[in-house]
Amino acid sequence: MEFGKIIDGKEISSSVRQSVKEDVDKLIAQGLRAPCLAVILVGERKDSQTYVRNKKKTAADLGINSIDKILPESATQQEVIDIVRAFNNDSQIDGILVQLPLPSHINEETILNEIDISKDVDGFHPINIGKLSMRGRKPEFEPCTPKGCIELINRSGIEIEGKRAVVLGRSNIVGLPVAMMLNNRNATVTICHSKTQDLKERCKEADILVVAIGQAKLVKKDWIKPGAVVIDVGMNTDENGKLCGDVDYAEAKEVAGHITPVPGGVGPMTIAMLMKNTLTSAQKKLLNC
């Protein structure tokens, strides 16, 4: 049995981006417009600002137009709603992304409900999440980070069907949707969280372990079934101030069959999947496909 095979998110995301760029170029070669993504950022969180800058740069590299609407922390909920509605009504915009988290005085659910589901490239509209959770239904878009996790597994040649998958974490952004996506691909899925009893033993049952719980280096090698696939969505800093995941990578790679590093694993996939969703939205409109 082979251990510690790295799932390289940088390499795989680069391949996804190249495919997106080729399809964008095809649209333009046919005399059609480039896809367009609109991003709304409220407040001055440094991590959100960095993420929006990275999205804008990636979009430019791929030939995708982007529009940024930057609002102060003091912006009202109605101001955000008015901008979302204006983007909904703009036929030149294919995707709308509201950068989360929003300031505490703005209701996230209310804002996400306002996004036209045909432009919900972040995949968080309740109708899209609802369809994701139902058999035989297909959402307009799947959420970007969970979609990136599945892409990493698929492109590594790992079979999902019939496997026992454990998802550690139940957030609306990662844990719940990735569990539904694994279920839709015929894995047998267990969702674990802070209230789960015998957490280590539940994780050790997994053929595929997705960790998104937000605790630095929580998962040690004795939590992992030998040969399991480990997808680490965590983004933390360790005791030395260095970036690390929710999995103790140095230990875990000794027993995991495949494992994502942090950084360089899931992270690069999120923006790549956002660009892919934006392209898909444009293709639906421009090519009627």
Image (cartoon, grey):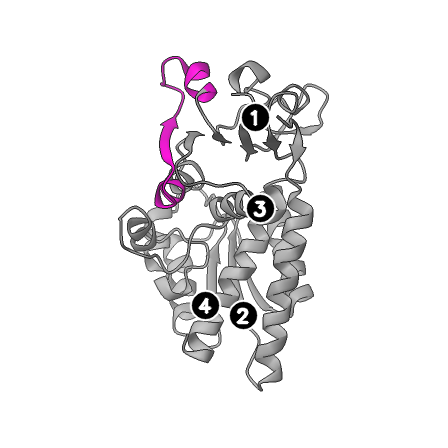
* Depth check, front residue: 237 or 149: 149
Image check: 9 left or right of 136?
right
Q: Earlier in the sequence, mark 4 or mark 1?
A: 1
Circle 4: element type: helix
Magenta segment boundaries in residue numbering = 180-204
Mark nearer the viewer, 4 or 1: 1
Position in image of residue 67 (x %, y %): 56, 66
Q: How crowded is mark 2: few (under 14 residues within 10 Å), some or many (20 or more)?
A: many
Q: Is residue 89 left or right of residue 264?
A: left
Q: Residue at x 59, y 26 (%)?
A: 256
Mark number, residue 171: none
Q: Earlier in the sequence, mark 4 or mark 2?
A: 2
Residue 262 visible somewhere in the drawing: no
Q: Answer with mark 3 or mark 1, whichever residue precedes in sequence.
A: 3
**Label 4 belongs to which residue?**
281
Q: How crowded is mark 1: few (under 14 residues within 10 Å), some or many (20 or more)?
A: many
Cα distance between the residues tagged 3 and 1: 36 Å
Q: How far apart are marks 2 and 1 (CA)?
A: 42 Å
Give left or right: position of 184 versus 25.
left
Q: Which amino acid does label 3 sit on?
A: Ser
Residues packed near mark 4 inside 10 Å, few (<14), some (14 to 19) or many (20 plus): many
Disc 2 is placed on an element classified as: strand
Q: Which mark is residue 48?
A: 3
Q: Report which residue position mark 1 lands on.
A: 227
> Which residue of the protein is positioned furthest toward the bottom in this rendering?
31
